[in-house]
Amino acid sequence: MSKLTLGAFFFLVLLFFAIFTSSFEYISIADSDNETSVENATRNAMTQAINLGNARVNEEITINEDIAVEAIVRQYADSSDFFEGERYVNIYRISERAPMIAVDSYTVINTPFNDMASRITKKQAPNESITRSREIVIYESKALTK
């Protein structure tokens, strides 16, 4: 009987370890996807929003803020590969002169480990994991003279 009890204990430990490891990898994949999505979206939006006419005439780089906002949202939606959970993108600041974009994004997901912990503790509040990524892109001039 003791071998059966010991085997059941090791099976439960192995099951707990497998669920914890899969949940950790799940969060790691979500975080990596969120980070690359916001980085690609911000950099591509900055490139798309440059006013080329102003760059040709005044030799100064400025961006169109409306195009930048639209491009960030579109690029962020297109570049994400992890479709579990809820995704949010916050655009904190866009500056036209001294072109700058500051973006924050986060993903709210439920993992198997959190679901298991909720059932064991019988909590009614949702156990959610949140991954955050921030990206700031600034274009600076190397010299102040033309």
Image (cartoon, rainbow, N blue to C red):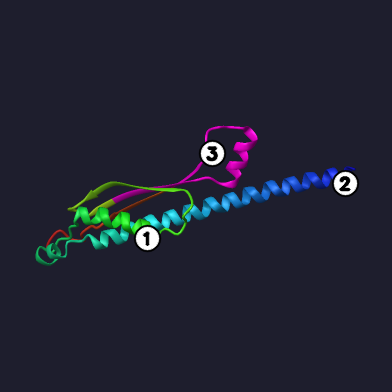
Q: Amino acid at mark 1?
A: Asp
Is residue 111 on the magenta stretch?
A: yes
Q: Mark 3, mark 2: which one is toward the viewer?
A: 3
Between residues 59 and 70, which one lies in front from this camera angle?
A: 70
Position of residue 78 relative to residue 105, above or below, is below
Residue under pointer 3? 127
Say if mark 2 contacts mark 1, CB within 8 Å.
no
**Circle 1 sits on which residue?**
78
| Image marks 3 and 1: residues in contact by CB distance under 8 Å | no
Q: Amino acid at mark 2?
A: Lys
For residue 138, the mark is: none
Q: Mark 3 or mark 1: name the one nearer the start of the chain.
A: 1
The residue under the point 68% across, 46% down is: 16
Q: Earlier in the sequence, mark 3 or mark 2?
A: 2
Up-down relation of residue 118 to residue 87 (above or below): above
Residue under the image location 24 percent in, 58 percent down: 139
Q: Secondary structure at mark 1?
A: helix
Front tag of 2 and 1: 1
Give the camera-side residue of 43 and 78: 78
Q: Tell me which segment is drawn in magenta.
A: 102-131
Q: Secondary structure at mark 2?
A: helix
Q: Residue at x 26, y 62 (%)?
A: 47
